């Protein structure tokens, strides 16, 4: 199983995380072309080899219409102030941009989930509804570019599990759209709740809101490097220079030798009799985007003869609190049951093969004397559309 470990001893920013993943690619220029093909309006990616205090790495630069990110990319405004001094973009507009990406549904869903975390953090910090959170136009597209790059590159690399070190946030103050604020900035601090962090003697903002949101969404654990056989090392270099040491994020990619045949999950359940199917479906979608391993419903009979639905969520123990917050936020429930379960599972990985010249991703699994493989449906459907054939005929091309 492919595993990725980010060392965040100099914090994390979206461009640094993306750069570290590009450095893991066999052909970074080919991967750069795939990023450009995402089709983000006005965005240009450029990549250069750079040096961070004797450490060789890559830096991914993003420009929007020739401009780089503005300071303070995130802010909130009421509608009558949305055009104050700068052009601003609402979350629904960001969603439209994400929907237009030339990428798989999995990548798009991950990008949306990261942006949801960003918007919710800004909403909490400023006491404004999520729909009133706006983003500076250039900064918003710059962040979309960074987030989309990380999501696409993780998919390309076939990473099955992501973890990271405790996050160094820096010290001192940072100047942003709202004035001079302490490090970490309020939105960053909100996003890093529950994640091990530390300060230090490095003056400056080491972890940005985008970096914090990406770590929160993708990382299942934070701590020492897990047991793994490292096969590749990539360094993503930042633009800032610090006298205390080189500024980079290091990504370790490897294979885990750990027996994944057994693991522990938390099962959360609640009974619902006053939600429509559409509302339940929306809640299920949000739970899956939030990191649930599985979400499913079961028809049940409830008191007074009412038909109802039992909503069940399986998640990693570390994700239990996040899942509870989503359940209480997106359903009408007043209480949730929980149980710790042991599972027997096959070891899984993602592999890519060509079918009639078109790359198709497969889910491969092995263990307990069994081997299984199944094409990703999104890729199978894309193949059928490209060749103008049925799904049955597309499946035959994969044999």
Image (tube, grey):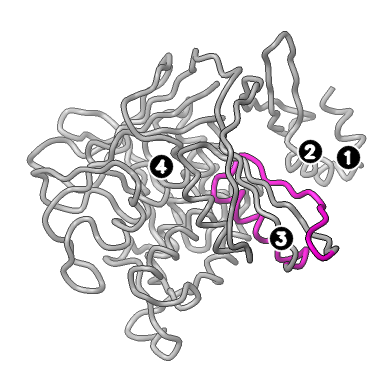
Q: Which residues are magenta?
A: 275-304
In the image, 220: left or right of 246? Answer: right
Tag 2 residue: 380
At 20% across and 53% down in the image, what residue appears?
A: 205
Instruction: State the separation of the CA atoms marked 1 and 2.
Output: 7 Å
Instruction: Specify which label sits upstream in the sequence, 2 or 4.
Output: 4
Label drawn at residue 18: 4
Look at the numbered discs 1 and 2 and tell me whether their residues touch, using CB distance below 8 Å. Answer: yes
How many residues crowd around disc 2 within 10 Å: few (fewer than 14), some, or many (20 or more)? many
SS for callout 4: helix
Instruction: Specify which label sits upstream in the sequence, 3 or 1.
Output: 3
How many residues crowd around disc 3 within 10 Å: few (fewer than 14), some, or many (20 or more)? many
Q: Give the label, 3 or 4, closer to the camera.
A: 3
Instruction: State the separation of the CA atoms marked 3 and 1.
Output: 36 Å
Instruction: State the separation of the CA atoms marked 3 and 2.
Output: 35 Å
Instruction: State the separation of the CA atoms marked 4 and 1.
Output: 34 Å
Label drawn at residue 391: 1
Tag 3 residue: 272
Instruction: State the separation of the CA atoms marked 3 and 4.
Output: 41 Å
At 34% across and 56% down in the image, what residue appears?
A: 209
Q: Position of residue 211 (x, y in %)?
A: 35, 49
Determine whether 229 is above or below 6 in the image.
Answer: above
At 82% across and 26% down in the image, what residue appears?
A: 398
Residue 108 seen in the figure: no
Instruction: State the separation of the CA atoms marked 2 and 4.
Output: 27 Å
């Amino acid at each position: 199983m492919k595993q990725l470990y980010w060392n965040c001893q100099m914090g994390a920013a979206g461009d640094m995380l993306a750069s570290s993943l590009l450095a893991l690619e066999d052909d970074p220029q080919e991967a750069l072309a795939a990023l450009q093909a995402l089709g983000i309006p006005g965005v240009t990616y450029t990549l250069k080899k750079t040096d961070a205090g004797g450490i060789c790495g890559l830096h991914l630069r993003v420009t929007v219409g020739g401009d780089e990110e503005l300071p303070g990319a995130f802010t909130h405004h009421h509608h009558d102030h949305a055009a104050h001094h700068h052009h601003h973009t609402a979350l629904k507009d960001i969603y439209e941009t994400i929907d237009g990406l030339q990428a798989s549904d999995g990548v798009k869903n991950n990008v949306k989930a990261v942006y949801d975390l960003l918007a919710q953090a800004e909403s909490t910090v400023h006491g404004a509804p999520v729909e009133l959170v706006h983003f500076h136009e250039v900064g918003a597209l710059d962040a979309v570019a960074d987030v989309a790059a990380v999501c696409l590159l993780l998919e390309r690399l076939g990473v099955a599990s992501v973890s990271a070190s405790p996050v160094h946030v820096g010290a001192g103050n940072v100047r942003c759209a709202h004035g001079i604020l302490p490090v970490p900035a309020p939105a960053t601090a909100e996003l890093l709740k529950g994640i091990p962090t530390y300060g230090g003697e490095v003056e400056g903002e080491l972890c940005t809101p985008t970096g914090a949101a990406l770590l929160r969404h993708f990382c299942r654990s934070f701590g020492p490097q897990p047991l793994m056989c490292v096969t590749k090392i990539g360094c993503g270099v930042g633009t800032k220079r610090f006298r205390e040491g080189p500024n980079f994020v290091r990504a370790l990619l490897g294979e885990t030798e750990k027996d994944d045949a057994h693991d522990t999950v938390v099962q959360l359940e609640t009974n619902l009799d006053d939600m429509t199917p559409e509302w339940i479906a929306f809640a299920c979608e949000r739970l899956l985007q939030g990191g649930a391993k599985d979400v499913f419903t079961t028809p049940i009979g409830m008191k007074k003869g009412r038909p109802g639905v039992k909503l069940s969520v399986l998640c990693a123990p570390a994700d239990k609190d996040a899942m509870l917050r989503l359940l209480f936020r997106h359903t009408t429930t007043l209480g949730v049951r929980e149980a710790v379960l042991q599972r027997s599972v096959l070891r899984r990985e993602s592999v890519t093969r060509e079918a009639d010249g078109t790359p198709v991703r497969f889910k491969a699994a092995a263990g307990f004397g069994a081997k299984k493989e199944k094409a990703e449906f999104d890729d199978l459907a894309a193949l059928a559309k490209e060749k103008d054939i049925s799904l049955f005929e597309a499946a035959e091309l994969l044999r």
